[in-house]
Amino acid sequence: MRTQVLIVGAGPSGLLLGQLLHKAGIENLIVERQSGGYVLGRIRAGVLEQTTVDLLDEAGVGARMHAKGLLHGGFELAFDGKRHRIDLQALTGGKSVMVYGQTDVTRDLMEARASAGLPTLYEAQDVSLHGFDSDAPFARCKMAGKEIEIRCDFIAGCDGYHGVSRASVPAAVIQTYEKIYPFGWLGLLSDTSPVSHELIYGRHERGFTLCSMRSQTRSRYYLQVPLSDRVEDWSDARFWDELAQRLGSETAAGLVTGPALEKSIAPLRSFVAEPMRFGRLFLAGDAAHIVPPTGAKGLNLAASDVYYLWQALGEHYREQSQAGIEHYSARCLSRIWKAERFSWWFTSLMHTFKNEPAIDAKLHRSELEYLISSPAAQTVMAENYVGLPW
Ligand code: APR
Ligand code: PHB
């Protein structure tokens, strides 16, 4: 079997890259370890920067997002029982974000790929990558127990944090940076109307809370929980009760509760691998970097990697230029580190840390007070939240 670009992983990065390459007339094949249904079962963040929205439009998959997504011109910070609005539009010269779930983005991309008749090998086992330091890279995998070999010009490693792509690179040529936070996010999805029409990020002595949504009738809430907690420890009733306590009586008065459609705990991590290209192997999305979800930068960073890779491969095939390929890693990393900084800062500001020195809690509170009183500080936050330019 042969293709021009072999994409490992059919998450949002791999699917978006596949769609864009196809539009540019570049042949691609995706190998994915899981089934399509499994990929769609993962619930993740849901805030898209304008540049991500534009790229999804470019890929021809924006119709449902524009019909169903919610444009948000601001969000709120809550602490000490009060809510303070960050007016994204006023602070950034009219920019907003699109609230549209990653599951929906993935579904739109999967459907577009299927209707374009593009090949995806789901449930591919034991994918291994070879020869990417030469001009003739190839991969092997097993399909229904039968070994196949796929030859290609390039390999795009879009296979997430636990994928085979980054793991295939010799340790001596890759450097990784990692921070693991001492708590997780317990998320609950329910068919209830959101407590507010915009997102609320809350700091409380019992821990962080986030009130988000998927639509006018579907809410997504998160609670900071210790890493030792298990989902089974959290009945729906306990979740709603804890959320109400952290939100405070005024906001909790408008909280509509209902049965959980999904509940899960996600750990929080900052992670970057450098560089992001090894000969003819490129890393993109979660394969190369992870941000903690405060600020929802994960999918947006995946989109900018894909944008640079699509441009680079387009230049290679169209103009025989290697410039985009040479610069891919540096271009991605420049944007990634800025989003890593923002996500780390927002996480540190809003969460409570066990055994935190009393002075740290005071400093965080002081920073929040500064933030709500200073248009300059709010502008810094807003320009990062809506997304830095590509
Ligand atoms: N072989 C083939 N496929 C694999 C392998 C492997 N060895 N390992 C992992 N995969 C697949 C996974 O099953 C998954 O479907 O790669 C895909 C990677 O998808 P994601 O983890 O969603 O990563 P990415 O597409 O980069 O999406 C980034 O996801 O975690 C969020 O915040 C993040 O929103 C961002 C987005
Ligand atoms: C979500 O809706 O899941 C969400 C929104 C904003 C975030 C993180 C997650 O910062």
Image (spheres, rainbow, N blue to C red):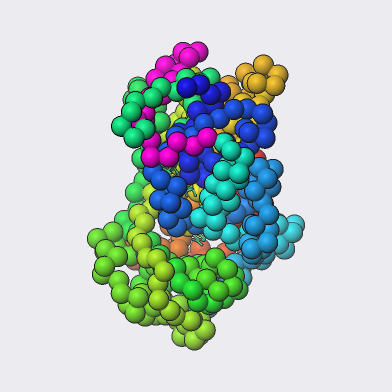
Does residue 121 show up magenta in the picture? yes
One can see residue 240 in this view: yes
Instruction: Indicate left or right for 253 with 303 as reference.
Output: left
Seen in the picture, residue 230 relative to 192 is either above or below; the reply is above
Residue extending farthest right: 93
- The boundaries of the magenta stretch are 119-142
- Residue at x 36%, y 46% (from the top left corner): 179
Give the quadrant of residue 34.
top left
Nearest the eye: 76 or 314: 314
Q: Quadrant of the C terminus?
A: top right
Q: Position of residue 47 (x, y in %)?
A: 57, 57
Nearest the eye: 111 or 231: 111
Nearest the eye: 167 or 276: 167
- Residue at x 56%, y 43% (from the top left corner): 114
Instruction: Indicate left or right for 14 with 266 as reference.
Output: right
- Residue at x 26%, y 67% (from the top left corner): 232
Q: Position of residue 378 (x, y in %)?
A: 62, 61
Give the quadrant of residue 121.
top left
Give the quadrant of residue 63.
bottom right
Q: Position of residue 348 (x, y in %)?
A: 43, 57
Nearest the eye: 325 or 111: 111
Seen in the picture, residue 359 relative to 3 is either above or below; the reply is below
Does residue 22 show up magenta in the picture? no
Seen in the picture, residue 10 relative to 65 is either above or below; the reply is above
One can see residue 289 in this view: no
Q: Position of residue 221 (x, y in %)?
A: 45, 69
